[in-house]
Image: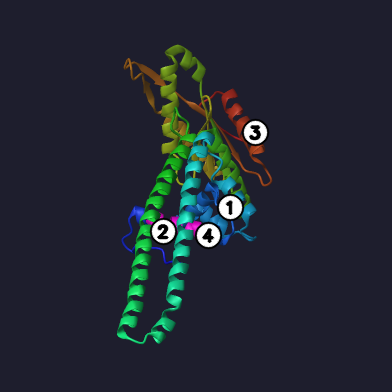
Amino acid sequence: MIDTPKPPAQPASKKEKSYAITVKALEKIDQLNLPSSPHFYELWYRYFDADPEITRAINTHQGELDEAACQSFYTRFLSGTANDGAVRKVSDQVTTSIAELVGMLKNAGAATAEYNSSLSGVSDSIGKASSLEDLGGVISGIVQETRKMLTKNHELEEHLASSATKVTELKQYLETVKKEASTDSLTGISNRKAFDRRLQECIEESGDAQAPMTLMMVDIDFFKKFNDTYGHPAGDQILRLVARTLVSNVKGQDMAARYGGEEFAIILPSTPMAAGLRVAEVLRKAVESKEVTNKVSNQTLGSISISIGVAELVPGEDPAMLLERADKALYEAKKTGRNRVCKA
């Protein structure tokens, strides 16, 4: 097999890094005898690009890394938030790029085999040379074949660089599509689909590590009345304000998402109930301290408040059970006066 060009160790440009990762991903797909499909390419590109969740999951996998296992990793980490139409479009383009790369590598292998064949008889030809003219002819043949090989190497390098650039551009586009598909368009924070996926992951991780986890359900008090009084634009402004306040007051692995309507949800991994209640109070006070001003009329609309229900994961619970308990705690907070925190 011909030696493919390699980027310098340091410093490496984004293009060179992407090219190196692309080659590794394709080699891994071939090594595992996987179909040359876009989702397997994306899985292994992410792995060699040091995606922390994918790297940890694959490195700790106990069974065989076969097609079923790789499909499971893809489904778990990559397929849940993608927009189907856009993904199909990108997948078709990635499939074409992969096919081109595979074709180039096969051509390089054929060219190498041809070059090796040409050189295999050189020793005999040199031994049979009876004059300087004969020897000169052999050397000329070697030079000619070597020049052909160098030309093909250069062409392969250019083609690989071009294809790697195309695949990188498609990957960046796919990242944008996935981000948009997992983001609430009004508030800019995670949407319900992204929340559902993350909640399932956190419950599984909490069980594996035997670590606590807390869930909050948050509701804006009297939102419908506010919306009806001041109009939907003002209501949208309130939703964005609350979303920004929640996100700015949760850290690290914590996740705030718009659950639906005027309701939000917050996941606090590795957090017991006591700490979760403290965070909830911080959030409640932060929202209460905001004074709302109509951006169009500059009219002061007053302050708003939120009610919060907090539930800590019980071993053996699934997402629906945990959500139900947090929702009941939220209902209790609203029933007993609003602008307060209640625990399940």
Please indicate whether residue 258 sits to the left or right of residue 200 in the image: left
Secondary element type, mark 2: helix
Q: Which amino acid is tagged 2?
A: Ala
Q: Within the image, what quadrant is residue 301 found in?
A: top left
Secondary element type, mark 1: loop
How many neighbours does mark 1 have within 10 angstroms: few (below 14), some (14-19), or many (20 or more)? few
How many neighbours does mark 2 have within 10 angstroms: few (below 14), some (14-19), or many (20 or more)? many
Question: Looking at the image, do the residues carrying marks 3 and 2 touch, with CB atoms under 8 Å apart?
Answer: no
Q: Which residues are magenta?
A: 17-28
Secondary element type, mark 4: helix
Whichever of callouts 4 and 3 sits on the residue coming sooner in the sequence is 4
> Label 4: which residue?
28
The image position of residue 303, as x and y in percent, is: 41, 22
> Label 3: which residue?
324
* Disc 2/disc 1 C-alpha distance (Å): 20 Å
Query: Which one is closest to the eye, mark 1 or mark 4?
Result: 1
* Disc 4/disc 3 C-alpha distance (Å): 43 Å
